[in-house]
């Protein structure tokens, strides 16, 4: 009998599938799972979670500072920035990706707040994807400032995907 290489490859694949058919998969669904099974990832908690927070001092007038952060999953993103002096004006920006102060004008902005009267300054975006982001805080002056910030991620429903590994 004259077999073609394609038929030989197909026959080999069928034999391999039959030999390996009992591995993994169905045995891992047993409780407790047998050795060699990988545990499913822990789901990200629903509700509002602090992703990053901190304080910075010495932010000179007409200067920006950047704080990189990472979102582990999709959700609602918001940030609160407060400062010491009521006479100063601090603006807030959030960009997608790692972005530096020198790159600020070319960054991909997802949210910003440039209110001249709000204190603290609040900024948010309703649907963001997992990944790297940067929070910028800009002191419009007239004096040097100390700022504090909190960045939050809110998971709103059970259909949100699991966190990135």
Image (cartoon, rainbow, N blue to C red):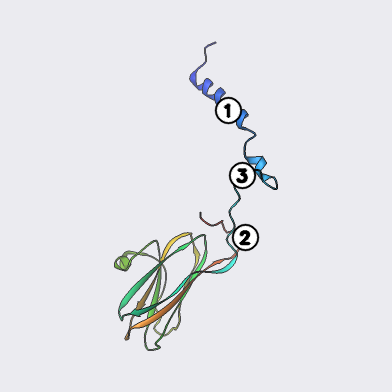
| 106 and 82: which is toward the camera | 82
Residue at 39% x, 87% y is 85
In primary-sequence order, the first of circles 3 and 1 is 1
Q: Is residue 113 above or below residue 133?
A: below
Pointer 2 or 1: first along the chain: 1
Residue appearing at x 59%, y 47% in the figure: 38
Q: Residue furthest front?
A: 35
Q: Secondary structure at mark 1?
A: helix
Are dots 2 and 3 in contact, CB under 8 Å?
no
Inter-mark Cα distance, 2 to 1: 39 Å
* Residue designated by label 1: 16
Q: Residue 123 placed where, x, y %?
A: 46, 74
Question: Which residue does the numbered mark 3 point to in the structure image?
Answer: 37
The numbered disc on residue 3 is none
Residue 50 drawn at (x, y percent) = 52, 70
Give me the C-alpha separation between circle 3 and circle 1: 21 Å
In the displayed image of the protein, which residue is found farthest to the top?
1
Q: Which sits earlier in the primary sequence, circle 2 or circle 3?
A: 3
Mark toward the viewer: 2 or 3? 3
The Cα–Cα distance between marks 2 and 3, rounded to whole angstroms, is 25 Å
Find residue 11 and report its horizontal and vertical position in percent.
Answer: 56, 23
Residue matched to label 2: 158
């Amino acid at each position: 009998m004259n077999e073609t290489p394609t038929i030989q490859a197909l026959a080999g694949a069928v034999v391999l599938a039959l030999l390996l058919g009992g591995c993994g998969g169905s045995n891992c669904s047993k409780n407790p799972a047998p050795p060699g099974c990988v545990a499913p990832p822990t789901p990200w908690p629903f509700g509002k979670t602090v992703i990053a927070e901190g304080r910075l001092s010495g932010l000179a007038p007409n200067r920006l500072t950047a704080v990189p952060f990472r979102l582990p999953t999709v959700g609602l993103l918001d940030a609160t920035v407060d400062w010491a002096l009521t006479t100063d004006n601090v603006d807030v920006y959030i960009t997608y990706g790692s972005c530096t102060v020198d790159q600020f004008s070319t960054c991909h902005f997802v949210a910003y707040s440039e209110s001249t009267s709000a204190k603290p300054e609040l900024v948010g975006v309703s649907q963001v994807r997992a990944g790297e982001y940067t929070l910028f805080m800009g002191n419009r002056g007239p004096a040097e400032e100390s700022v504090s910030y909190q960045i939050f991620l809110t998971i709103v429903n059970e259909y949100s995907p699991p966190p990135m590994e």
